[in-house]
Amino acid sequence: MIEEIRYDFKQYPKHADDFIRDLIKLMLISKMNSTFKSSLSRNNFRNLIKQIPGCEAHIVKYGRPILYVKYKGMEFTDQKVTSQFVRINDYVVDVTVESVFGEFVRNFDKIASSPESRVTWGIVKDADFVINPLFVLLNSFINAVNELTLLNPHNPDSLMGKKFGIRNANVTKNTIQLEFTIDGRLNIIELNASKKIKDHIIVLLFTNSQIAKTLVSIMKQ
């Protein structure tokens, strides 16, 4: 099942930015995973998603057990749902959601579009705990993506009018490796919260895209 949805924020243009940020969070959550075999990675993954209200881990066996996220009742895996968005202009965003499960398409759209279902993370309930630094890096990634969607489409660094998607978000220890697509072309960056040198915290591992290079450059500012 494929559903294409247009969100028009003409009356409240600034809401388009909030929508895109929440949408990317949901896209990332839907692709978060970690190996179950490594106890360190397993524990870090569970500690990370504890700071996302509505999240818990669940195990999927693809030859070897892998941890994925169950978010607001939706048990995500690699194959459950795929989503992309295109910012048409300052206030119009087109979203494509695809899944063999119709309920996943409907629920994904419901969470993405409902103001009551805003996606929040980095939430700690105990004063003794600190926000996981990976959320700081993920927020930097999201803000950079949104910033590039606001550039004039004639700018070579602009994401306006281009399809953006998240393919994978693999969590290992204090690191998350993000695979994202721009018009179907794969890019990979690594965010490492345990590093001290900025060039080692955000590393572009694979790209053929000037836009991806600019995105990383913005994140490092």
Image (cartoon, rainbow, N blue to C red):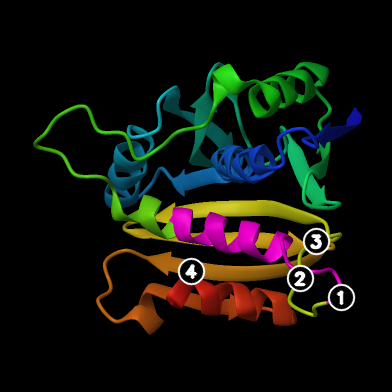
Check disc 4 and give the amino acid type.
Glu
Q: Nearer the viewer, residue 68 or 209?
A: 209
Overall secondary structure of the magenta stretch? helix
Residue receiving disc 2? 158
Residue receiving disc 4? 190
Kind of element beneath mark 2: loop
Residue receiving disc 1? 154
Instruction: Report x, y in % for residue 130.
Output: 19, 44
Check disc 1 and give the amino acid type.
His
Q: Is residue 116 left or right of residue 195?
A: right
The earlier-in-sequence mark between 1 and 3 is 1
Q: CA distance from mark 2 to mark 4?
A: 22 Å
Give the quadrant of residue 57: top left
Check disc 2 and give the amino acid type.
Ser
Q: Is residue 45 above or below residue 176?
A: above
Residue receiving disc 3? 160
